[in-house]
Image: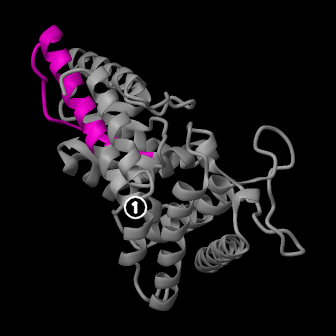
Amino acid sequence: MDTYLEIRRFRDSQSIWVSRNHIQLNQLHDKIIHSVITVSIKQMEDRYGPIPCPFTFFMMGSAGRFEQSLWSDQDHGIIYQQQSTEIQEYFLTLGKEISLGLHLSGYEYCDGAVMASNPLWCKSLSQWSLQLESWSLDSSWECIRQLLIFIDGRSLYGEPEFLENLKKKVYQTIHNEKLLKKALNNTLYLKKGIGVLGQILVETHGLHSGSLNIKEKALFPYVNAIRLLAIKGNILETTTLSRLERLSEYELPSIKRELYKKQFLKLLNFRLTLSKPDNYENSHYLPMTSLTKEQKKEIKEILKNGTDLYRYVRNLIEKEEN
């Protein structure tokens, strides 16, 4: 595939075959994004000359966690080895080219500009190290949010150790400065999925009235809770499922780990099979009227277990850091 248009055609032709299998779908996303990067690099080298130094391109958000649905927006960054004004300009231009290529290939731009086209997310190793240290020591709500976004980073091209070594430093600083409680507070507000009478809480107005916001009410409790446990246990993996597998018995007993793994995987597959994934926004909602009685029961169980998991993690961290 030599152009973004060819990549888009490939995506459109292949998506239908993997649209109901979470792992195969995310493998396809990785292949598409990798192809975009390859085309972007060729464009850059044709226009501005060879890549000036080793680098890594990494994904964050659902792409970093290998948890994308059929449609996804962009969350990514670049870490390059050496620092100079010319090198910085080169990689920022590469970041803009990749962002454009991803957009043309069907990935919406990130509303919050968490993209390698943004200087905040495109820096040299030394600049990244200083920025991460600054976010950690500042430890305001926004800075902690940036750190949590970075922690979900997964290298997709280039030198993965650049990202891995920076993550290790972040984890060390979080433990040294006792920032886990602040990380917990950053994700403390979760929208309830089940009401006091045991009913599933759906959207009450707007385009998605009668639908469950699966992203905010179902996925986030699992994602946020397991990320906090991963930080606590110095686990560098980014997918929620692989983080669960690496947790120790102390952090989460094996019987609970197996339950949450099954529930989370079932949730990801429900999102693919039961939502209307015709665009990015719609893929986050489950219309309740299209669900069977048994499916509603399963969704309710997933929501309940997600709430229980998050409450357990909150109590664990509050108890240890008080």
**What range of the chain is rendered magenta?**
31-60
Query: Which one is in front, 62 or 267?
Result: 267
Q: Within 10 Å of the Cα at label 1, are there few (<14), some (14-19), or many (20+) other Cα atoms?
A: many
- Is 258 situated left or right of 307 in this image? left
Decide: is 134 above or below 51.
Answer: below
Decide: is 14 above or below 102.
Answer: below
Query: Which one is in front, 47 or 316?
Result: 47
The quadrant in which residue 182 appears is: bottom right
Instruction: Please identify the quadrant where the N terminus is shown.
Output: top left
- Is 212 situated left or right of 269 in this image? right
Disc 1 is placed on an element classified as loop
In magenta stretch: residue 34: yes
User: What residue sits right under mark 1 in the picture?
Assistant: 239
Residue at coordinates 56% horizontally, 32% vertically from top-left?
A: 112
The quadrant in which residue 185 appears is: bottom right
Residue 30 visible in the displayed image = yes
Q: Which amino acid, by three-letter code, is at mark 1?
A: Thr
Q: Work out which residue is located at the far right of the displayed protein and give it.
A: 197
Residue at coordinates 41% horizontally, 73% vertically from top-left?
A: 233
Residue at coordinates 17% horizontally, 44% vertically from top-left?
A: 159
**At which x and y percent is residue 131?**
41, 38
Query: Which one is in front, 292 or 277?
Result: 292
Residue at coordinates 43% horizontally, 89% vertically from top-left?
A: 249
**At which x and y percent is residue 181?**
60, 65
